[in-house]
Image (tube, coloured by chain):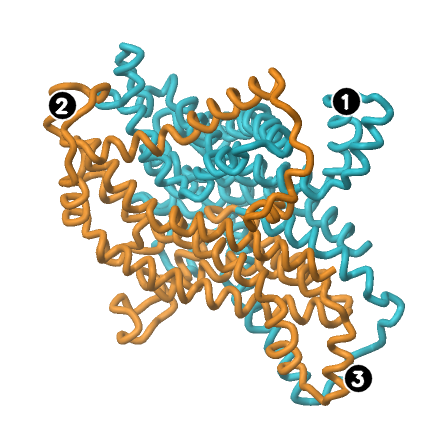
Chain colours: A cyan, B orange
Amino acid sequence: MSDLPLIRADRAAPPPAAATPTGGRRRRVRLLSGTDRVVVTLMVLVPLLLVVALVWLPAGATVLLSGTDWDGIGPISDIEWVGGRNYADVVQNYPPFVPAVQNNLLWLAALFVVATPFGMFLAVLLDKELRGTRFYQTALYLPVVLSLALIGFVWQLLYSRDQGLLNAVLGTNVDWYGDPGVNIWAVLVAAGWRHVGYVMLLYLAGLKGVDPSLREAAAVDGASEGRTFFKVIFPVLRPINIIVLVVTVIESLRAFDLVWVINKGRNGLELLSALVTQNVVGEASRIGFGSALATIMLVVSLLFITVYLATVLREGRR
Amino acid sequence: MRTATVPREAGTAPASRRRPPLRPARVVLHVFLAAVAIGWLFPILWAVLTSLRSYEYTATNGYVSLGGWTLDNYVTAWRTAEFGKHFLNSVYITVPAVLLTLFLASCVAFVIARFSWKTNIVLLGLFTAANLLPQQALLIPLFRLFTRVPLPAFMSDSEVLYDSYWGLILVNVAFQCGFCVFVLSNYMKALPRDLYEAAMVDGASVWRQYWQVTLPLCRPALAALATLEVTWIYNEFFWATVLMRTGDKFPVTSSLNNLRGEFFTDNNLVSAGSVLVAVPTLVIFFLLQRQFVRGLTLGASKG
């Protein structure tokens, strides 16, 4: 979950930074006294240890465990190296794997192709100083502050077979959360509901920061509103585009809460994240196997994170 | 982002310099936006509406009806799901976690922004990336680690990090630090460096530069981050679900899952429970917007 301040920080950065003498960087290390050196070390080391111990070491351990046959019970000395067998098992002998990959991809596609453009579209509309824009914004942004677990419950009131509004209005008898043919779509509507507000907010923040003279210049040239947006405004919003892209990909990969509260990610709602959790928390804990699944997630996310960081950090240094 | 709306909010009219006369296109736009906004609010309003009606009434008359108004669902939900206890648990976890996250993140961010060392970029990458990793991918080793790290009995009756508030606080801090480091280091880099030169001339130690020069100037960013982090950690579901076992210790968001069993057949109770869980975030939601406005205007006026 990354949210608004990414933009805040981006936007807050340029003006005062311009006053910073970039050439005046001296070696400050020498100016630090002994105490200062200890303080600086502690300031970095304590948070770093925490993040390494609870995030990076477990990430590394997951990769290592994925090559073993550990069942989670026996002593560590009994662990045997099995190479790529777990991966082969995941792909060949694990029926939920293919549906999970499909669902994760579908999740990404739905957020990326439907929710994201719609959120952007709303941001463009709301950017025109309208009367009542605050109400519209508030309504769209409201789902963003709710947890996805809670959203699962809120939508159950519409989706439930016997007591849901949808069946009552449509006169149907569909179990929207339970029927494996439709439940992924029902869940995607709920997930998209939240995502639209999120994207709208990110773009609205970006649009407010666009230099108005750009628009005026385009208007003078007689460019239509649509043309102005796609040819002039959209390219300027590059930092936001990158953030939205990363947020969408990461959120699709990490999607978990919503399906877990519905049926723990079974029966049509398989997701990689839920499969990993099932394999570890359930009765039959298959550590090596679960780790192979987890490693797949890890590799995909690290690819995107690396690209994202490379872009952001390079731009930050300019 | 809301800089443009600020002047209007202040109660004066200069922002409405030239409001065009109402054209048909504008009317269509308003109708469209109003329809979308109401559609977006609908699921939440429906939850509130359902929660205010008795189960007997909706069971006989269906949900597409009016009547059977009652507050009993809230009373029953609060009592059966023991919301009081779970809200307190959320407070025990959220408050220390947010404070610790902001403190640790601001320390790292200060070092990154204050000194131009080559390692800073690696440090920033290491923290930011940690925030974006899928939590489930770390679950297996972390779960094992938590069941093995002992805690004295007075800290947790589970006597290990697993199934303790301490464990949840630490894991939330570790995950959220990255985001705050990223935001705060950007914010701090934007502060004029002359401040530090002046502080150094006065003989201020690094700690005093951090605590008395940088941090007070970061108050707007810290306030915005604090409101965000409170919402996120309060909403956190996964870690509490997998790293807690004792039902009594669950924070309110993940206790939702247990609540489902108890309320199985009664949607009116489910909705009352959902509304109760949403209330703190909705309250923060309105505070949050203010925080952003304040943070932005301060950030903008500094330039």
Residue shown at 57% from the left, 52% from the top: B293
Quarter where residue B51 is shown:
top left
Residue at mark 3: A30
Residue shown at 87% from the left, 72% from the top: A24
Residue A3 seen from this side: no
> What secondary structure is marked by label 3?
helix
The crowd level at tag 3 (other Cα within 10 Å; few <14, some 14-19, many 20+) is few
Horizontal side of residue A234 vs B240, given as left or right: right
| Camera-side mark, 1 or 2 | 1
Q: How many marks?
A: 3
> What secondary structure is marked by label 1?
helix
Quarter of the image with the C terminus of chain A in it: bottom right
Dot 2 and dot 3 within a common chain: no
Please identify the residue farthest to the top as the structure is shown. Answer: A171
| Camera-side mark, 2 or 3 | 2
| Camera-side mark, 1 or 3 | 1
Dot 1 and dot 3 within a common chain: yes
The crowd level at tag 1 (other Cα within 10 Å; few <14, some 14-19, many 20+) is few
What subunit carries mark 3? A
Q: For the residue marked with disc 2, what is the amino acid?
A: Ala
Residue at mark 2: B59
For residue A218, above or below residue B27: below
Q: For the residue marked with disc 3, what is the amino acid?
A: Arg
Q: For the residue marked with disc 1, what is the amino acid?
A: Arg
User: How far apart, in angstroms, are the residues tagged by discs 2 and 3?
Assistant: 77 Å
User: How far apart, in angstroms, are the residues tagged by discs 1 and 3?
Assistant: 55 Å
Image position, residue A2 (x, y; %): 56, 47
Residue at mark 1: A227
